[in-house]
Image (spheres, rainbow, N blue to C red):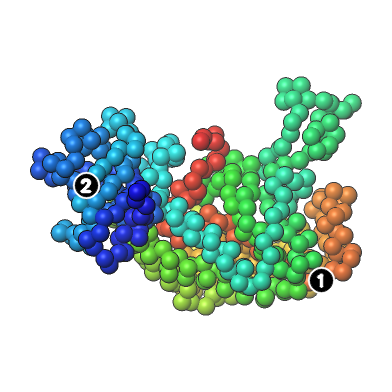
Amino acid sequence: MKMRRTKISALLKSTSTGMDVHVKGWVRTKRGNKHVNFIALNDGSTINNIQVVADPNTIPENVLKLVTTGASLAVTGQLVESQGSGQAVEIHAKTIDVLGAADPEKYPLQPKKHSFEFLREIAHLRPRTNTFSAILRMRHAMSFAVHQFFNNKGFNYMHTPIITGSDAEGAGEMFRVTTLDAKNPPLKEDGSVDFSEDFFGKETNLTVSGQLEGELGALALGEIYTFGPTFRAENSNTTRHLAEFWMIEPEMAFYDLEDNMDLAEEFLKYLVQYALDHCADDLAFLEKRLLDEEKNKPANERSAMSLTDKLRFVVENKFERVSYTEAIDILRNSNPNKKKKFQYPIEGWGTDLQSEHERYLVEKHFQKPVILSDYPKEIKAFYMRMNDDNKTVAAMDILFPGIGEIVGGSQREERLDILSARMTEMGIPHEEMDWYLDTRRFGTVPHSGFGLGFERLMIFVTGMGNIRDVIPFPRTPGNAEF
């Protein structure tokens, strides 16, 4: 009778020994001598390996020769108490079947330290490393936590289109979707491309946000959230930018800016607490990785907090709420600004804040997460609600240690006349957005929402320094491999 496979994560938690077990996985390392072999086996269910002890008198030599790093095995043996340190149990192998060999001369993931740059070049194999298997398990855990949080609060998960004819951010940095012949597109009399002959009969792009369609859902269902891929054709080769990334965007009818801030703070604390509660082994590994990495940095560049300290910092502190105007005064009078240590000096009101300013507010001045609100209208999007001063909008950004802005949101402009005027002021064509304006014509209500970049969250909870390392297959300028 065929033995059922047991996951390694379950075996490592086992309090029973002496029974026969059947496991499958990939070889991380093999060491030993002519008397005994120790095989570290991992099946992806946990950061931890199980040790398989293989006796050459039991396991044929021709099989053991194929047991190399990267090979996949099926092992049957007895689960016993481990004699070594580092694990409570191990398997004494009775049979080993090599499911797939891995030529040690060619397999690129040998037991040594590989740079993240090198691992990005082999992104199809990097999930087999400890670091990236930990990140992917945490990515799953955080995705699950997002859905659980909103489901528990009665929100509806809404699928908004990936292909769109509107630019939610008004930035114009969008990827075109077309079936027209790139070499010989149909042209109008004025020489411009005739998109009426395209697949959708108009110019279409990959979405930069599900927000506008999300608002339509909220103004019928009350509270919705989107969670899906978004795309920015921004030619930016930095550690914080991707061309394809995932966004979480809740939209809520009858919420003002204060309600919006309350929900966003509760949401972030829930996600971070979920990571602390459910990802302990992976967090411990990633924390040690970060400590080892920081040992090589100059003292002034090292983080003041460990990874789990940063997570607890978010959970245990009430977020400080400060207006943009107050923040500008703090920054203008700060020592780094006076001593010209900011790369982007704060000249005065109206300045668009940079990451260095945001991190100063969180890490140095308030020493807690910060919610900034009421930004100048000139540096924010057309759909944000105008405040009574006619200078600022009811926008809010949440700032975290180490990364700066992690959430951006606002109360949306629900008044048709003011929204229309704002669109005219910013050159947004009314006819293309008539469907959006209908929600203000028919039964408009105050409503709010925010966006959380999922990869920004993943950078925070994993301690990784590059956004390309927290998504399985990064899409960046010049790179669309795998």
User: What is the three-letter code of the residue carrying label 2?
Assistant: Lys
Badge 2 marks a residue whose secondary structure is: strand
Residue 336 against residue 23 in the figure, above or below? below
Q: Nearer the viewer, residue 467 or 229?
A: 229
Residue ID at (53%, 54%): 455
Q: Quadrant of residue 387?
A: bottom right
301 is higher (above) or lower (below) than 15: above
Helix, strand or loop under label 1: loop
* Residue 131 locus on image (x, y percent): 37, 51
x and y, in percent, of residue 70 in the image: 32, 39
Residue 433: x, y in percent?
Answer: 84, 52
* Of callouts 2 and 1, the N-terminal one: 2
Judge depth for marks 2 and 1 and give the one in front: 2
Query: Which residue carries the number 1 mark?
Result: 445
**Circle 1: residue type:** Val
Does residue 308 appear in the picture of this structure? yes
Residue 167 drawn above or below residue 365: above
State the residue in front, 353 or 154: 154
Which residue lies at the image location 35% right of the left edge and 49% below the top edge? Answer: 1
Name which residue lies at 39% across and 69% down: 309
Q: Which mark is residue 307?
A: none
Q: Which residue is mark 2?
A: 94
